[in-house]
């Protein structure tokens, strides 16, 4: 998970704790403000669904579904944001999902970006 999303500590049980520390930086090598999340698992249906909720990032749901011999990931983020925050938030998740796609395509193992 560190290769495409964040350094993670996860207590994988209902009401368990999720702590994410994003390692990506700006063009000057500085980590972004608010680059951590401590959340609580609100739904857990192994191996197909993980949902957690935390301040500043809202409710995040990761759901896997088999479709025609492949696996489809549906990611949902529900959070109240200003218009400007919403633009930044969507862009950030898109980048991490692109990193996941690259990592899966390359099968290169963990590479922090």
Image (tube, rainbow, N blue to C red):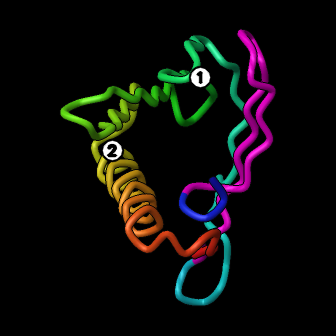
For marks 2 and 1, give the CA distance.
17 Å
Q: Specify whether 105 is left or right of 17.
A: left
**Which x, y percent locates residue 61?**
46, 26
Residue identifier under label 2: 86
Residue at left offset 33%, top offset 44%: 86
Crowd around label 2: few <14 · some 14–19 · many ≥20 (10 Å): few
Question: Where is residue 26, by image quadrant?
Answer: bottom right
Q: Which residues are magenta?
A: 5-25
Q: Specify whether 19 is left or right of 80.
A: right
Report the mark closest to the observer, 2 or 1.
1
Residue at the front extreme, as displayed: 69
**Which x, y percent locates residue 63?**
41, 27
Residue at left offset 65%, top offset 85%: 29
In this rendered view, identify the residue nearer to me: 84 or 98. Answer: 98
108 to 12, vertically: above or below: below
> Going from the N terminus, do you reach mark 2 or mark 1 first?
1
Residue at left offset 30%, top offset 37%: 72
**Which structural element holds mark 2?**
helix
Residue at left offset 63%, top offset 27%: 54
Residue identifier under label 1: 53
Res 4 seen here: yes
**Which x, y percent locates residue 68?**
18, 33
Q: Quadrant of the C terminus?
A: bottom right
71 to 112, vertically: above or below: above
Residue at the bottom extreme, as displayed: 28
| Residue 17 magenta | yes
**Which structural element holds mark 1?**
strand
In this rendered view, identify the residue nearer to me: 56 or 39. Answer: 39
Question: Where is residue 24, by image quadrant?
Answer: bottom right
In this rendered view, identify the residue nearer to me: 10 or 88. Answer: 10
Residue at the left extreme, as displayed: 68
**Which x, y percent locates residue 20?**
70, 46
């Amino acid at each position: 998970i560190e290769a495409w999303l964040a350094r993670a500590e996860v207590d994988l049980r209902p009401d368990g704790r999720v702590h994410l520390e994003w390692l990506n930086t700006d063009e000057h090598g500085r980590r972004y403000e608010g680059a951590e999340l401590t959340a609580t698992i609100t739904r857990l249906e192994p191996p197909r669904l993980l949902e957690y909720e935390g301040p500043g990032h809202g409710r995040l749901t990761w759901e896997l579904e088999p479709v025609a011999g492949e696996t489809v990931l549906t990611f949902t983020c529900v959070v109240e944001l200003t218009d400007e925050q919403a633009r930044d938030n969507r862009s950030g998740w898109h980048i991490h999902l692109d990193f996941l796609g690259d990592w899966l395509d390359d099968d290169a193992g963990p590479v922090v970006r």
